[in-house]
Image (cartoon, rainbow, N blue to C red):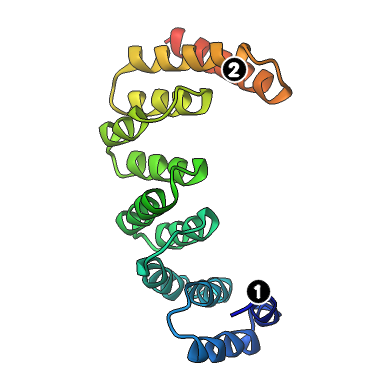
Amino acid sequence: MAAHERGAAWAGADGDALRAVDAALAAHPGDRGLQLDRARLLAEAGRVDEAAQLGLEAIAAPGRLRPDDALAVVGWCRAVGRAEDALRVADVAIARGGPAPAVVEAALALELALGRPDDALGRLDGLPPTATWLDWRGRAAVSAGRIGDALDAWTRARDLAAGRPTPANRATVAALDDLLGAWRRR
């Protein structure tokens, strides 16, 4: 189905839009984009359980996943208490489309929320040592009770960000200086 046809279905999250997507799905069963459009409409209508389930069904279809689609399904699953399913969606998206940073961050947050800091650290092992990933390494290390490792990761993140003086990195350096100072005062 063409994007302009999908756009017509996005007239709003009312019954007409849902009926339009349902009609398009009847003509194009198994169309992942249409399934996700329907799931988005369901979520907007407050039917998040149904959106999560339909999103999971759409994700099961083979093929590459766009990070924004994966993140939408992750969000619906988390909203209805299906953290393991949310993590599975993130893993599928990473496996099929590569480690999109937002999807990896969602997976890391889920691992930590599920009380699995060692799994989060394992996910970080294959990633380049950027300030973002080092910050996540620090968070996971704190969750695992390894404060020294966390301080080391945050110090490395701070030093990397300081080496590239952009406005965003200056803010990162300031935030990490505050964080490091607070932990060192403990």
Q: Amino acid at mark 1?
A: Ala
Q: Residue at x 32, y 59 (%)?
A: 85
Q: Residues within 10 Å of mark 1 (few under 14, many from 20)?
A: few
The residue singled out by tag 2 in the image is: 161
* Residue type, numbered disc 2: Ala
The residue lying at 33 percent from left, 35 percent from top is 123
Q: Position of residue 106 (x, y in %)?
A: 44, 45
The residue closer to the viewer here, 121 or 151, is 121
Rendering coords of residue 170 (x, y %): 68, 18
Q: Secondary structure at mark 1?
A: helix
Position of 161 with respect to 25 (left or right) is right
The disc, 1 or 2, on the residue closer to the chain's N-terminal end is: 1
* Residue 102, above or below 26: above
> Is 52 left, or right, of 111 in this rendering?
right
Which residue position is annotated with label 1? 3
- Quarter-of-image position of residue 52: bottom left
Q: Which residue is drawn at the image coordinates 37% and 72% (left, top)? A: 57
Image mark for residue 166: none
- Towards the viewer: 75 or 33: 33
